Amino acid sequence: MALIVQKYGGSSVADAESIKRVAKRISEARKAGHDVVVVVSAMGDTTDELIDLARQITPIPPSREMDILLTAGERISMSLLAMAINNLGVKAKSFTGQQAGVITDAVHGKARIVDVVPGRIRETVDKGSVAIVAGFQGVTESTNDVTTLGRGGSDTTAVALAAGLGADVCEIYTDVDGIFTADPRIVSSARKIDRITYEEMLEMAASGAKILALRCVEYARRYDVPVHVRSSFSGVPGTLVTNASNVTTVPGVDAGTSEGEAVMEAPIISGVAHDRSEAKITVVGVPDVPGTAAHIFEVVAGAGANIDMIVQNISGASTGRTDISFTLPESDGPVATTALNAVREAIGFESIQLDDQIGKLSLVGAGMKSHPGVSAKLFGALRDAGINIEMITTSEIRISVVTREDSLDAAVRAVHTAFDLDTEAEAVVYGGTGR
Amino acid sequence: MALIVQKYGGSSVADAESIKRVAKRISEARKAGHDVVVVVSAMGDTTDELIDLARQITPIPPSREMDILLTAGERISMSLLAMAINNLGVKAKSFTGQQAGVITDAVHGKARIVDVVPGRIRETVDKGSVAIVAGFQGVTESTNDVTTLGRGGSDTTAVALAAGLGADVCEIYTDVDGIFTADPRIVSSARKIDRITYEEMLEMAASGAKILALRCVEYARRYDVPVHVRSSFSGVPGTLVTNASNVTTVPGVDAGTSEGEAVMEAPIISGVAHDRSEAKITVVGVPDVPGTAAHIFEVVAGAGANIDMIVQNISGASTGRTDISFTLPESDGPVATTALNAVREAIGFESIQLDDQIGKLSLVGAGMKSHPGVSAKLFGALRDAGINIEMITTSEIRISVVTREDSLDAAVRAVHTAFDLDTEAEAVVYGGTGR
């Protein structure tokens, strides 16, 4: 039978009842003959409560101590889950990130996995036990210090373990049925995607789709780990994220779906992602001389801000000046403007505008660039809906546009309909997400 | 300056405010120039809450998983305490039992320390930082599994670390001012003991005094670690537990107290301990032939019950039968009676009586056996108070008597007064104890 890695987020193990329910699902997979490794997040709001405790102690907790504090959360959920599985007559043992061999760098709070040495996990499943592993955490090789992986950490732990163990599939359990063609809270007719490639999923994640963290998809793509995103509340297959060239068969998903066959006929539109978390900075009146743009973006990068889209207007011939706009996470806005204002005279621009009322819509799909009709249809749909486009960027498999934030929902719905993504079936949203 | 190990129980770190208060005390010791290692228990009721969570999942949690669950408690308190100390401008780092090198056997739930390898702790204090260590927990050497030490575990961690580091003193912070001549909740005129030997403290602990766990005192005695029991609420010296032959000087305690000088003039009565947690089993009508007592106690030991006092009546000459009584922890009563009833015919006794309404009073002090006047005075005091004695045992430095449970408080007060232990000063009791 297969080796399956399952990951359950905080909302799936929020209380004793939820833990028992998840334990039942895990023991069924084991009883069906599969080898099962489970990655689990901290229960419900545990992490937030621990952060709150730390804030009561000090405004700036040392990051090493913060990591020790936060990893207590998974310690609780993993041991309770192992107890619940044992209680159903299936052997189970829990392991910390360290015991599971998750080696990271020493950047506390957002460590990156540098190696996975899952000898004890392999040994445990070989003996017929379920291995429960704490998500979100690892250990530094040199100092044996506990680290946490930051946002999306548990998903990444699961994919990294699946890669290290050569698992047949990494199942990410969540509170929705899979990846949808748009956020079902905005587009009620959104359709569940049965299969999607790593590349498309990367673009979806980078464009604001929140189900899978970007780094987790990157990891899965690098090590070619099939990821099955599915609901912990239902038994139906979810979304399979795999390599396009390989119509992978994984446990729990039928082979040869219609999407699998249709790969030959590009363009395949995967879905419409959206993002409200960005802001736009416009540097006004920049001298149009070589090296100025480089100087601006060096300053912004030096302030630790991540730039997303960039647009430079055509230079006004009479003035010798231009405007440069770029988007970045809203939270990076203040540091970036402060850093830029400090070099205003050196660069010689006139002023800076910070606009946090923007929204970004991204259409993601294979073979988009070779089909000019796609962008024409996208812009047409937005025009017909009366929505103004402020910025545009494109990649091989994505077109993103920036609109006013209050037009974003209407834009997502218009584009979703224009590309025939609507379905009759009602999408189910259960609310809440794990870490 | 000195190397000091300080241990704080759960009630000393019950919330953010308490943690900040303890952090202040620790940083003052560090600022006074001492090297400081701190052992900390889980916050307040954390352990009970975790046990309750486990019970919601399963009635019989696997002990390995239970240990992983419970150790989350110290992880939270130790990291918060390290944060609070750093916030006061003193460097501090926290370490799990494993990171601190606390190696135990593999008996989950009540592991025993087999070795302490505190290399990282030594290194940390050598660099001028305070090292915070999780109490109550260790790790097995062979399997790298997390263990807990059971009752009194954090005190034992502290003494074991003090021994491993060659510390000048191990300070056990609690919610009372030290060890008293009797429980101040029963004897309001009880007096704080300034100095007491390991042997006397062992007898006090074994006789029901709850401030220090027996195993912790045993460990301190074996490695000759001076233990200073004191209040985390006041700055006054508490009780120093040391070797009698050596008038030890430790930081925070004046040398040469009156007790130190008075060691020459035995008997020195240390105090009156009491214990309500025992029950008495009487085996009635036992054939008075060799080997019968051995058979009975083999059966009781085989059932896992710990026997304390034993009394055998003089054989009735006419019947050839006798009665054997013994005391044991109340909780062991049912298994012991069940095991004995199963061999009633083989041994040939008539019946078994289980009595859980007993109390035990113990008078502890050096040189008691060589002063026959001590037991005479003890029995006289109880007679004058109208209290009946049911059983008596003596050791080199202790006399214990069993009374009716409802006479115990009066017995303790009568004996305390008879031996001139009463003081004018009001004892302070703050309530609650850590683990």
Image (spheres, coloured by chain):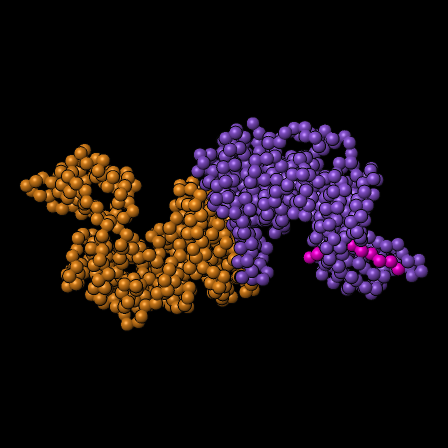
Chain colours: A purple, B orange
Q: Which residue is drawn at 40% across and 51% down?
A: B153
Asked whether A311 falls inside the magenta stretch, the response is no
Q: Which of A415 and B217 lies nearest the eye of the viewer?
A: A415
Looking at the image, the residue that sits furthest to the left is B318
Asked whether A330 falls inside the magenta stretch, the response is yes
Q: Is residue B185 visible?
A: yes
Magenta-colored span: A321-331
Give how far across and how far down residue A431 sits, in percent.
59, 47
Position of residue A255 relative to residue B4, above or below, is above
Q: In which quarter of the image is residue A357?
A: bottom right
Q: Residue at x 27, y 70 (%)?
A: B423
Q: In which quarter of the image is residue B209?
A: bottom left
Position of residue A265 relative to residue A82, above or below, is above
Looking at the image, the residue that sits furthest to the bottom is B424
Q: Which residue is drawn at 75% across and 49% down?
A: A411
Give how far across and how far down residue B417 sits, in percent.
22, 66
Q: Which residue is drawn at 60% across and 38% down?
A: A230
Give how far across and how far down residue B105 sits, in percent.
42, 42
Give how far across and how far down residue A110 sits, in percent.
63, 50
Horizontally, is B120 left or right of A391 in the view?
A: left
Looking at the image, the residue that sits furthest to the front is A424
